Amino acid sequence: MIGALLGVIGEHGALVGDIETRYVGRDHFLRDVTVSAYDQPHLDEVLKAIREETETEIQNVRDLVFERHAGGKIRVGRTTAADTPEDLRYIYTPGVARVCRAIEQDPALARQFTSMGHTVAIVSNGTRVLGLGDIGALASLPVMEGKAVLYDRFVGLSAVPLVIDEDDPEAFVDTVCRVAVGFGGIHLEDIRTPDCFWIEDELIRRLPQPVMHDDQHGTATVLLAAVLSALRHTDREGRRDLTCAQVGLGAAGLAIARLLMDAGFDVVGVDPGAEARERLEASGGRTAELHAAAEEADVLIATTGVIGLITPEMIRPGQVVLALSNPIPEISPEAAVEAGAAFAADGRSVNNALAFPGLFKAALDVGAPAITSAMKIAAAEAISALAPDQELVPSPFDPRVHERVIKAVSAAA
């Protein structure tokens, strides 16, 4: 019965996950079977097939994603005792007044006597959320909560989602500046291009604490780690006399190109938009048409979201090809290798969770006023060093990753 069930699920294009036996009887089993489908119509098709093509009886259908989000994913908790009247005298009135006065006289004490020194604000206006586009501030909140979970899980930082219902960049920046005083760092997330460039630059200019747009720099840091690993896998470790072609100069692509240049690589950028090309050229990079860039590239990177943009004919023998768009890359790794690439991978390897927790943790630990290119390069080198054989990066659940990123970034800072 279970074999027939799984066969039907597979034949209809769904993925089988965990299988847990709940009850064993004389004539039936009760099992929870986790199935991944593309969307609701696909799930409906799979359920219909199970009913019509097997003797399985479907007892219940649960959505595990919504179950895991029910009630939200984070909460604020205390770190000190609050059990007796004496506790309240220390942490609240009258004792708290002494701490307030001390911070008034020396604002630097806030890092020692409040949560500011280990708290990051995750700020978004929801104008470019994942691949969903402009869905608004409120609908972006689950993403920000997810980021907060990762901060807590991987480096023990507290992170507070701040979704701001404001599309105007100047008003958005003004709002962030007004609320930033209580946070050790500002993590920007899911803000549309080109607003994200000006917003980040302006906040860096106006605020004393580190500010980083993760869609740009978290992605760039992990991508640099992937490039370093790919070069190691193709016996070119340590070489910087190589040309990297960055195809697509949006938020992530431009940051990748800039960080690769800072790491010592020659970079040529490709983008149909004149404004995007001008940004790279203003940073000291050069631009070219796609075919010309692909022809000279030792490392070909694509972040465009355009399926099939890179054809097998564009691949030069010996190239490293990283086509990163999800869920379908610009060229499949298999097609790139068949066309002559020495190494190829898609976007499943580039997980920002490898970078942003350690970058902010290190910045807050050492009191760094900004997250610099040197810090991002140090993080990328630490991440790449732990990549298993023939893999570009390690798992974010490898406990060594975040410890080594924090150590390397702290030293660079």
Image (cartoon, grey):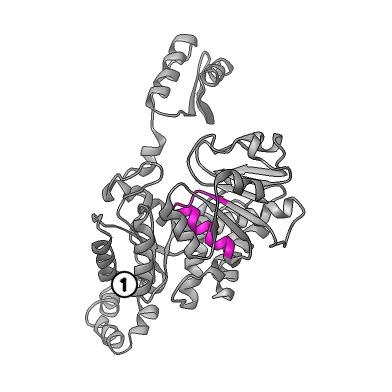
The quarter of the displayed image where residue 84 is located = bottom left
Percent from the top left, x then y, of residue 62?
38, 30
Looking at this view, is 262 or 74 the one in front? 262
The magenta stretch is: 246-261
In the image, taking residue 254 as reference, residue 138 lies left or right, namely: left
Query: Which image quadrant for residue 278?
Result: bottom left
In the image, 91 versus 315, the foreground residue is 315
Q: Position of residue 289 (x, y in %)?
A: 54, 47
Residue 240 drawn at (x, y percent): 68, 62
* Amino acid type at mark 1: Gly
Q: Position of residue 368 (x, y in %)?
A: 47, 76
Dominant SS of magenta comes to: helix
Q: Looking at the image, can residue 101 be seen?
A: yes
Q: Is 114 covered by the magenta stretch?
A: no
Q: Which residue is mark 1?
A: 182
Looking at the figure, which quarter contains the N terminus? top right
Give the SS element for disc 1: helix
Question: Taking 115 as reference, is 381 above or below it?
Answer: above
Rendered view: 381 above or below 395: below
Q: Quadrant of the C terminus?
A: bottom right
